Amino acid sequence: MSIYHLSPVQIIVRSWSGYCKKQLFAVIVCFLFFSSTLYAQKTSPFPISTPEAEGVSAAGIGSFLNAVAQSKHEFHSFMFLRHGKIIAQGWWNPYQSTLRHSLYSCSKSFTSTAIGFAVSEKRLSVNDKVASFFAGSLPDSIPPYLAALTVKDLLTMSVGQAVDPTFAVASREDNWVKAFLALPIAHKPGSQFLYNSMATFMLSAIVQKVTGQKEVDYLKPRLFDPLGIKGMDWEINKQGINTGGWGLRVKTEDLAKMGQFYLQKGMWNGKQLLPKEWIEEATTFKIDQAPGIAQSKRDSSDWMQGYCYQFWRCRHNAFRADGAFGQYIIVMPDQDAVIAITSETGDMQGELNLIWKYLLPAMHPKALSPNKGDDVKLEKHLSALSLPPATNTSNHTNSTFTKTFSIQPNALHISSIAFNITNNVCHVTLKKDSASYALNFETGKWLPGKTDMQGPGLVTGAREDFSLLVPYKVEGSYGWNDNQTLQLKLRYIESPHTETITCHFTDQQLNANVEYSFNYGNNKVVLHGELVK
């Protein structure tokens, strides 16, 4: 029997019988190490291993983390699996392993998976005509290209529409199915690639049509439950259909599970959940995003390697699920590796370049010699990851501050802002439309909270039912830049985004800039206020 199967008492008794007290101390220390490792294994969805044992340089992972810290990319989480084992994982405080994270278009790969299950159950085929599912929503006259449109054309983003209709449909229409089917199709379906999130929504609508369930419910017993994915939710439109192309929220470890599931070609815990043939079909080249592009540009881009069924091909024979601002599941079959990332970046290619530059060469075919020094250094690095809160940058600060301002009409519909700073906590009451929101911020650290106020995002203008997202989890921090300038930072912690309000007080007036992290300093909303009390 190995030490992993002994109780603490058994270990100590056996050790006492064979060793002196001094040696026993060393054994107990060894036990504490093993027990912490065992605890990590019990609380983790995957076995835990050291990088070197799985043929990866811990120093190489450390170099990747250093490069991230020096880059313009804001990482929120990172998990690295090799040979089905976790060799590195970390969350940048205040993000945590227990939190879900909005996936944006990374959701599309889960929709593709739902289609795969429906195909394997013979509920539909990829060659079925889209029009056949929606007899009651079709235009009076069905154009030839609409009649020819197939499920496969939706999967491969080759509907044939001249422009992506997603924003126009989602922001103006309640019946997205009918609106999509009414749009003109300019090119033969299947002939041209055009990224189209509304096409993915139509796949979700088809799943619901043939199964009688929202795709999140359809996937639960087939994918989520077997993989141990819990607590997920998925946005819905006014018709009660999961948005499909965006809106899924799961934890980082769930992204890693999805990647490992695909790496294992649909196998999980010895059971083939989804046919291997479907996995291969869904993740291999289907359509060229830019025919005729110069080879030099193709060689430097992970967006020019071919599109699959709601997956992207990558360089180095990898493939990925991919969401706006850097939500990634990267599957590397040649290296038997999976990398899951949540983040916010304006340069998604730049994030992928860091993986190819630092993590790819860190992987080797065979196990490396143990290097405890590098392992300990890496573990300390991973446990210390953080994103800096707002803090006082001036000695001239206001430790107590109580003022209320009436705000002039503005694009955000904010009518008043009240400030009350006591005991290093800034309490802000913000009136917006007919509602009042209480927000709390702490100086020099992140203060957790909840709010019903919708945060920044790409789809906030969509005609959706956002009620399932409420209350939003937030983390707030504040700091004085000088005795007249207050900065408030509010992280919507289950999304990639942060809202920053910089308030400048002069006499009886407030001038404030509201900016969203994904605008990267552009498109600030300016607020002007008059002191009320």
Image (cartoon, rainbow, N blue to C red):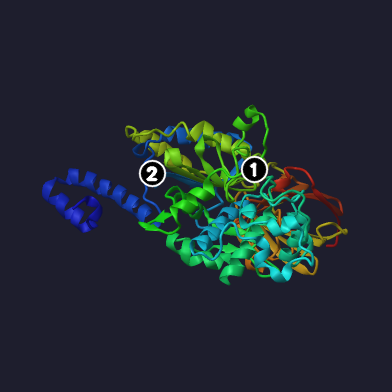
Q: Residues within 10 Å of mark 2 (few under 14, many from 20)?
A: some
Q: Secondary structure at mark 1?
A: loop
Q: Residues within 10 Å of mark 1 (few under 14, many from 20)?
A: many
Q: Secondary structure at mark 2?
A: loop
Residue holding disc 1? 345
480 or 260: which is nearer to us? 260
Image mark for residue 508: none
| Of callouts 2 and 1, the N-terminal one | 2
Q: Position of residue 192 (x, y in %)?
A: 69, 45
Farthest residue to the top: give it: 296
484 to 220, vertically: above or below: above
Q: Position of residue 81 (x, y in %)?
A: 43, 45
Amino acid marked by disc 1? Thr
Q: Position of residue 133 (x, y in %)?
A: 65, 66
Q: Residue at x 53, y 36 (%)?
A: 355
Q: How far apart in space, not on screen, are marks 2 and 1 (Cα)? A: 29 Å
Residue holding disc 2? 83
- Locate residue 181 relative to residue 52 in the image: left or right: right
Amino acid marked by disc 2? His
